[in-house]
Amino acid sequence: MAKPGKLNSVRRGLFSALAAIAVVLCGVAGHALAQDQASHEKVYAVTHVDIIPPQKDAGTKLVQQYVVDTRKDPGLVRIEAGAEISRANHIAIVEVWQDKKAYDEHIAAAHTRQFRQQLDPMLGSPYDERLHHSLE
């Protein structure tokens, strides 16, 4: 049989270990909750750009420069642009922003306004941008 003093020492050690585990688990849960809340604040902008065929090369270069410029904007999580395989003049732009404020600041940026003004006469259909939020 263990001595009472030694038994209390073991209990204190076990309690300390359990308390440390609880603190770590609370931290992990808090981090997961913060990530979950952050994912609901993110704004996903999906844009379809239909460039008239004679302007495909010039319009594609504009989109490429827009991507380069946008990657410098604060609050951007990710941006990708891709041309449709069967119709290279149809381009999809997918942007992920930390929140609506970052997206709004991007829309107001000089490079964004300039991109849209320069691209507009090259479009075969209206600039089609739609905002989304995560379902997760």
Image: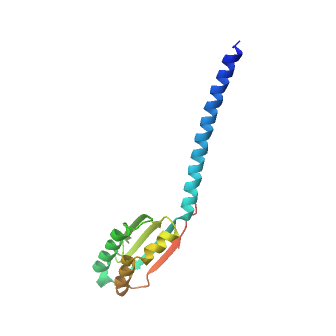
Residue 108 or 37: which is nearer the viewer?
108
Residue 51 visible within the image: no
In terms of image quadrants, where is residue 133? bottom right
What residue is at 58 percent from the left and 59 percent from the top?
A: 37
**Image spot of residue 1 (x, y percent):** 71, 12
> Is residue 14 shown left or right of residue 87?
right
Q: Residue furthest bottom?
A: 121
Q: Which quarter of the figure is the C terminus placed in? A: bottom right
Snapshot colouring: rainbow
What residue is at 71 percent from the left and 16 percent from the top?
A: 4
**Image spot of residue 86 (x, y percent):** 36, 73
**Image spot of residue 67 (x, y percent):** 36, 70
Vertical side of 98 occupied by 47: above or below: below
> Is residue 112 shown left or right of residue 21?
left
> Is residue 27 shown left or right of residue 57?
right
Vertical side of 64 occupied by 51: above or below: below
- So how many labels did they put on this image? 0
Q: Residue furthest top?
A: 1
**Image spot of residue 128 (x, y percent):** 46, 79
